[in-house]
Amino acid sequence: MRRYARAASPEELIQARLRRRTGLDPYKPYLVARHAEGCDNAQILRDEIAARGYTGSRKTVRRFLNTLGSPGNVPVPPPPALAVVDVVRWIIGRPENQSETARQHLKDLCARCEHIATTNRLARGFATILRRRDGHRLTDWLGQVEQCEIKDLHAFANGLRKDLAAVTAGLTVAWSSGAVEGHVNRIKMLKRQHYGRAGFDLLRRRILLAS
């Protein structure tokens, strides 16, 4: 509603339909280049990109070649836009487990966008606290979040502050309530199997004798 209220003209409300990302996107520049060289055989091109990691079908390649017209000098399209899911994986993943290409993509992206660079730095800082159980550093990390201008991180930090003592303990000590939560989930599962028709005595026997 806010977007409609702030629009100065109807044209601002018209959004272009986003093209869905496909598995062929990373190989399209190569296909365009080979098409420009005169190769228009979908099976041959499919085999060539399959050697580079493509797992799709020949028909998908054929459909893309049909959009290029006759073989000739076709300009190479720009590389496909980065997918949000890939950027998120680069930020929250362990740096030592990432490929050199992924690290370079993230480095270039951070150089172009200050907000992404700040998010990357703070997200990895929190991940380090989580992995090393450095709960004593959480207050300093929350202070860094308050100094940035990213509202989503502010919302996340505010949620942590609502139960700061418990969060700090969870990031410090080795104890966990995971086992208790597992038993609670098992009890709920047994209860739902009777669709609310089982009495307390039957449920008690099933819970106690299930193991």
Image (spheres, helix red, strand yellow):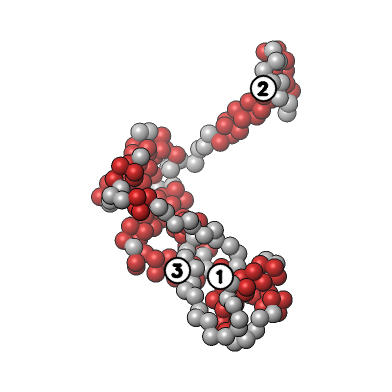
Name which residue type carries label 1. Answer: Pro
- Relative to 204, say whether 15 is above or below: below
Q: Earlier in the sequence, mark 3 or mark 2?
A: 3
Q: Residue at x 40, y 52 (%)?
A: 14
Cβ–Cβ under 8 Å for marks 3 and 2: no
| Disc 2 secondary structure class | helix
- Relative to 190, say whether 37 is above or below: below
Q: Around disc 2, counting alpha carbons within 10 Å, would you say few (fewer than 14), some (14 to 19), or many (20 or more)?
A: many
| Residue at the disc numbered 2 | 191
Residue 111 visible within the image: yes
Q: Earlier in the sequence, mark 2 or mark 1?
A: 1
- Relative to 142, say whether 178 is above or below: above
| Residue at the disc numbered 3 | 105
Q: Residue at x 61, y 70 (%)?
A: 64
The one of 206 and 18 positioned closer to us in this rendering: 18
Q: CA distance from mark 1 to mark 3?
A: 14 Å
Labels 3, 2: front one:
3
Q: Residue at x 71, y 15 (%)?
A: 198
Q: CA distance from mark 3 to mark 2?
A: 49 Å
Q: x%, y% of residue 79?
A: 49, 72
Labels 1, 3: front one:
1
Q: x%, y% of residue 172?
A: 43, 42
- Choose top left, top right, bottom left or bottom right for residue 191: top right
| Residue at the disc numbered 1 | 26
